[in-house]
Image (cartoon, helix red, strand yellow):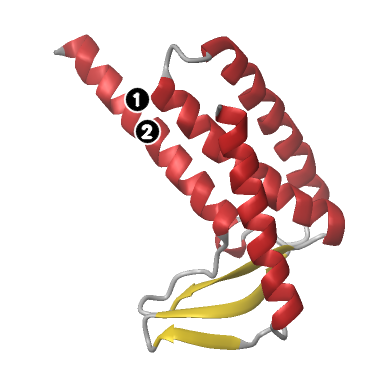
Amino acid sequence: MYYLIAAAIIALDQWTKSLVVKHMELGESIPLFQDVLHLTSHRNMGAAFGILQNQRWLFIVITIAVVIGIMISLIRIGKSQPRVSLALSLVLGGAIGNFIDRISTGQVVDFVDVTLINFPIFNVADVAITVGVGLLLLDTLLEGRRKNG
């Protein structure tokens, strides 16, 4: 089931990115909610927040290592820790979604632009990774409370 979640994230991520590439010019911005949320066609050759620009091979190597590590963890954990497995499947799907972009074009397609605040433009894969990491942190905190409490 967790691999299906990852596959669904990858499919949704790649589908949304393909729509942006096909129907929007680079730099074009479409307001969904004026001064709050826009669809903005953007390309990122770095990591989150645009750091480490033009380090394509570094990201490819790191992503391969992360994907292998997550897959091994999912096999070991299985259904015994569903919250952790769900979190890992989200990170796995997001990592592979952005990996596909890096391999195919050398850059990641971003398009979700929260204009209400000065926040970097992101995509579905980024959301999955962020939510997955957040769930892992939450699980770690809850587990620590159980052990100490």
Query: What kind of residue is marked 1?
Result: Thr
Pointers 1 and 2 in contact (CB under 8 A)? Answer: yes
Where residue 119 sits, quadrant-wise, is: bottom left
- Across and down, in percent, residue 24 comes to 69, 83
Residue in the foreground of this view, choosing between 57 and 67: 67
- Across and down, in percent, residue 99 comes to 74, 48
Question: Mark on residue 81?
Answer: none
Query: What kind of residue is marked 2?
Result: Leu
Up/down of 50 relative to 62, above or below: below
Which residue is painted at 76% across and 56% down in the image?
A: 101
- Which residue position is annotated with label 2? 137
Q: Is residue 120 visible?
A: yes
- Across and down, in percent, residue 41 comes to 64, 78
Which residue is painted at 65% across and 17% down in the image?
A: 72
Up/down of 24 relative to 140, above or below: below
- Across and down, in percent, residue 143 comes to 29, 18
| Gap in angstroms between the C-alphas marked 1 and 2 | 5 Å
The N terminus is located in which quarter? top right
Tell me the element at label 2. helix
- Which residue position is annotated with label 1? 140
